Amino acid sequence: MDQWVQNYNPLGVRWLSTAVAAVPVCFLFYLLAVRKILAHRAAVYAFGVAIVLSTAVFGMPARMVTGTVALGLVYAVFRIAWILLCAVFVYEVTVETGHFQVIKESIGGVTDDRRLQILLIAFAFGAVLEGSGGGGAPVAICGAMMVGLGFEPFAAAVLCLIANTSPVAYGGVGNPIRVLVAVTGLPDADLSAMVGRILPWTALILPFWLVRATAKTRDTLAVWPGLLVCGITFASMQFYWSNYRDSALVDIVGGIVTLIVLTLFFKLWQPQTIWRYPGEPGVKDLRRHTHTSREILHAWLPFLLLALFVILWGMPSVKQYLNIFTNRFPVPGLHMKVLRQPPVVAAVHAEPAMFEFEWIASIGTATFLAGFLSGPILGLSVGETMRVFLRTCVRMRFSMLAVLAMIGLGFITRYSGMDAVMGLAMTNTGVLFPFFGTLLGWLGVALTGTDAGSNALFGSLQVITANKLWLSPVLMAAANSAGGVMGKMIDAQSIIVACAATGQEGKEGDLFRAVLVHSILLAAIVGFIVTVYAYLAPQWIPAGHTFR
């Protein structure tokens, strides 16, 4: 088939073409935010609209549309859905065997001080859960844990939503970064490193922000050593792992290391006065749990195995061997057939399109192996372990459908040129684009509910606009993901999950209003950081970065 050139003004009127290009995204937002349709249905409907417009308005040949859909679905299955499913499987194994209760008590029993428990549960352990599977798990699990330990339910919901921010950019085993790689074509190492140079600054202040959200200033400053140790530890690990290791284990490693460091630190240091909520019953000494160190280590083994296998899968020698079993071949009728043209690119550029069936090399397979081995280690039979997996598949079916449709939508907008049309319109923000581009990522997560979804929709747009404005495409693609994390606390899914987990059904509106200001202010801070990198510290933006 002959090559096809993207048309960035198919209707002959620039603003009208831009409006039509934005229809799939706006329709998705409308369904989620206004109609409050379930995420998987909204994603499928918007995906369908994008397919129709790509052919009817932008003139993309039907065969190329079919190839694009197939490419997006294959990528979504092997690089996103399979990983997310298996990460949740690991968590479900710990719940099925009762060992998650040990994990909960081992964390909650380190200190009786509510301010410090916030750091351990909502911040550090929430990061582990976000890295393991993401979705609503960190908010749901940490919220239930905190209520179980005696936190006020509404306060627990607020705190878990605010805490579930910095880790979101790396999400379930690095999924958001992989999506960003898929839709932008930029190197994984560059994007991971750049996000890891933006978010550590917010990780430094987030512990102070969390405690100040629940206690007075003097009570917050009374535990400044713990807050500082928490922020520095997580920020350091987030920077180190994202810049020198990989994008998959940033949250898991950062969260686990922060838990260990805080546990050891709290054995050496405790505040002079144990802080509890006003009117709360007398202090219950949670540190007197009967679990031995061996029992605690045994309960944590699934997450440790997960980290071990993902690290192993990422080693160059192992990856090279596993890639032998990966099937790669061009997408018929699409590979190097779609041409991007100026002014979107400097010269006419043919878009590659390769199927990659990663049967064994996928990080999802490493994650599945961790869950499969964890079952027998924790006391399940092989059959019982597989039943847990099948039950997880059933429970996650709608989430998987939403992922497939969202990624498919991102691929359609990219290959049809709709993202380019919207990107050209964004160039009108000029020198303020670093700030407003960051807020675009924030808006995307607030309305789609996932950082990966926002990256799929706007990642390519960010790159196109950045190139037009002579800004770093790596910086602006990373800004989409980094800014998006602050929208996570106000998305409908997170609000609903937080209320359900803490027994606050019916108070979704109150919870939204309670976290909205935090979300806007933190997003503005990220926008400011991105602007500083763009104009005052461009030398700190990675280019050709490699993991060591």
Image (cartoon, helix red, strand yellow):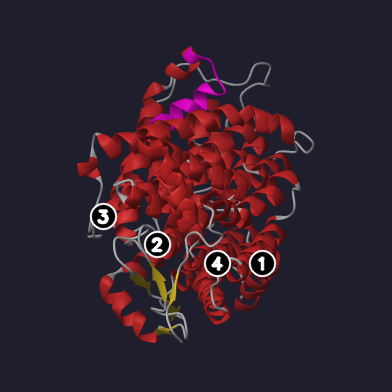
Which residue has dot 2 on it? 181
Q: Which element type, helix, strand or loop, lies under badge 4?
A: loop
Dominant secondary structure of the residues highlighted in magenta in the image? helix
Residue 487 relative to residue 344: left or right? right
As measured in the structure, the alpha-carbon distance from the residue carrying label 2 to the one carrying label 4 is: 24 Å
Identify the residue shown where x is 63% and y is 71%.
389
For the magenta stretch, what is the residue range?
204-217
* Whether label 2 touches label 3, CB < 8 Å: no
Q: Nearer the viewer, mark 3 or mark 4?
A: 4
Please name which of the two marks, 2 or 4, marks the residue nearer to the observer.
4
Mark positioned earlier in the residue sequence (3 or 4):
4
> Which amino acid is tagged 4?
Phe
Compare marks 2 and 4 and give the one earlier in the sequence.
Answer: 4
Residue type at tag 2: Val
Labels 1, 4: front one: 4
What residue is disc 1 on? 48
